[in-house]
Image (cartoon, rainbow, N blue to C red):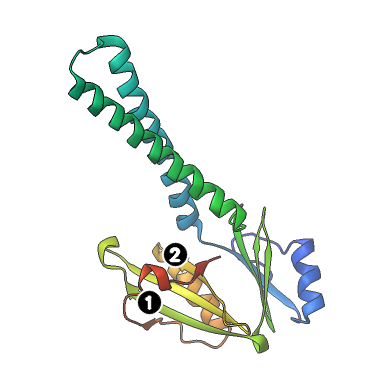
Amino acid sequence: MSTLQGWEITSRASEQARVAGLGPWRYTMRLSRKADSNSLKSEIVGVVVGLIVGTASVLFLWRWKPTSPVVWAVALVMSAVGLAIVAFHVLEAVRKYRAGIRGVLLAHVHDGGLVLERTQGPLHVVPLDEASLQFVAWDAGADERRREQLWITGLDGTVGAIEAWSDPECNELALLAAHFGLDPEPREIDAVDHARQPRML
């Protein structure tokens, strides 16, 4: 099998795989499509909503010129809330950019491991003899969905995760897990507190 989803290995991923001695390339798949899409939409919607809330309050004061101090105070608070919403989503976008979550996430699968590549960000080389993989699933509670994740633990103890949302993505993650000898059915675990969740790749 040469490719999945029509993706080919990139030159920089191929070079890193060669240096790490991962062996022959088998296929490449795109991961985290839904998560990336949701994240982008959330940031855009957040900025738009914040701008609407902030500017609507200012326009109200400018157009109607209320005399009540209470109305002025409420309008100014709403403007501050709008600006805070904009700032939060802009800072979240900057945080993800600095963390390297840019472009699409590709998994280049080799016999001896894989290379995870953000097409506009960094590469993560995962030799099987230097990392442990876990395929897990847990109930996120308020999200009202079951999260399936592939956890990758490096020699230094750091944990990164790949998450699947839709059924096709869950099937792809199961295929990836099975390729490396894991059970294609994820292991059920207790809900993970937000502060303890692994870093998304």
Residue 96 appears left or right of 155: left
* In the depicted structure, whether residue 87 falls above or below residue 160: above
Can you see residue 45? Answer: no
Residue under label 1: 137
Task: Where is residue 133? Give x, y as percent.
Answer: 54, 83
Task: Where is residue 68? Give x, y as percent.
Answer: 17, 17
Circle on res. 168:
2
Q: Mark 1: which amino acid?
A: Ala
Depth check, front residue: 107 or 42: 42
Q: Quadrant of the N terminus?
A: bottom right
SS under mark 2: helix
Residue 196 quadrant: bottom left
* In the depicted structure, whether residue 77 falls above or below residue 126: above
Q: Mark 2: which amino acid?
A: Pro
Which residue is drawn at the image coordinates 58% and 56% (left, top)? 101
Residue 80 appears left or right of 121: left
Q: Is tag 1's residue or tag 2's residue first in the polypeptide sequence?
A: 1
Structural crowding at the residue carrying mark 2, measured as other residues with C-alpha within 10 Å and reported as few (<14), some (14–19) or many (≥20): few
Q: Which of marks 1 and 2 is in front?
A: 1
Structural crowding at the residue carrying mark 1, measured as other residues with C-alpha within 10 Å and reported as few (<14), some (14–19) or many (≥20): many
Residue 145 quadrant: bottom left
Give the total number of marks visible in the rendering: 2
Depth check, front residue: 75 or 21: 75
Which residue is drawn at the image coordinates 44% and 66% (left, top)? 164
Residue 166 quadrant: bottom left
